[in-house]
Image (tube, rainbow, N blue to C red):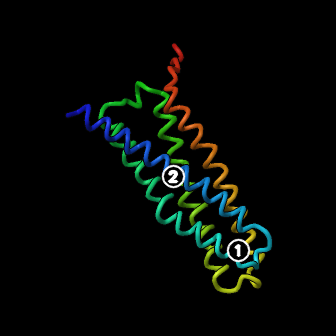
Amino acid sequence: MRRFIYSSLKVLHLMGLVLFLGSIFGHIVAGSLGGGPVSGDRFLAAREHIAAATQFLTVPGLVLVLASGVGLWLMGWSVKNSRWLGVHMGLAVMVTLIAFVVVLPAGAEMMALASTDMVANVEKIVAANRFEDIGGAVNVLLILIITGLGVAKPKWARKRS
């Protein structure tokens, strides 16, 4: 039974990663298709698609990755004995903080500004877009590092006194 639970958590972990990372690449595509002048209808349509993907794919994927990761950790991985896992989990916390403190608020602000008066709010939209882009790029880099650590599980030696 324990092996079944562990395997199920692994599958859920991978599904969450696919949802989360896949939706981020979808955001990039939607953003590039809605590129051009901020005042255009394409921009608003792209932001609507990104908002929906965030609500139904990105956030649930992140929650699934985190919940299944905690479940896997509780099933026996030791952060004390596995340095890579400590780094893995620390970076996951950073991704979560960046997502909820930088990326999601910037996206919500862009959507709100674009929905009210896009022309009057162009500068604010561009600034929020910059925050979302930077936070998103940092998160993609961190996610790739986290994924690499999870696959490689490096045996980092401890320094001897």
- Residue 87 horizontal/vertical position (percent): 52, 35
Tag 1, which secondary structure?
helix
- Residue 144 horizontal/vertical position (percent): 59, 40
- Looking at the picture, tell me which residue is in the foreground, 80 or 136: 136
Q: Is residue 69 left or right of residue 133?
A: left
Q: Residue at x 65, y 55 (%)?
A: 135
Q: Residue at x 53, y 31 (%)?
A: 149
Neighbour class for label 1 at 10 Å: few (<14), some, many (≥20)? Answer: some
Q: Is residue 156 left or right of residue 124?
A: left
- Looking at the picture, tell me which residue is in the foreground, 50 or 120: 50
Q: Is residue 126 left or right of residue 89?
A: right
- Looking at the picture, tell me which residue is in the foreground, 17 or 101: 17
Tag 2, which secondary structure?
helix
Which quadrant does the N terminus fall into? top left
Residue 130's label in the rendered image is none
Foreground mark, 1 or 2, reads: 1
- Name of the residue lying farthest toward the left: 1
Q: Residue at x 57, y 43 (%)?
A: 143
Q: Which residue is mark 1?
A: 42
Q: Quadrant of residue 68?
A: top left
The amino acid sitting under disc 2 is Phe
Q: CA distance from mark 1 to mark 2?
A: 24 Å
Is 32 placed above or below 95 here?
Answer: below
Residue 20's label in the rendered image is 2
Is 82 placed above or below 34 here?
Answer: above
- Residue 159 horizontal/vertical position (percent): 54, 17
The amino acid sitting under disc 1 is Arg
Neighbour class for label 2 at 10 Å: few (<14), some, many (≥20)? Answer: many
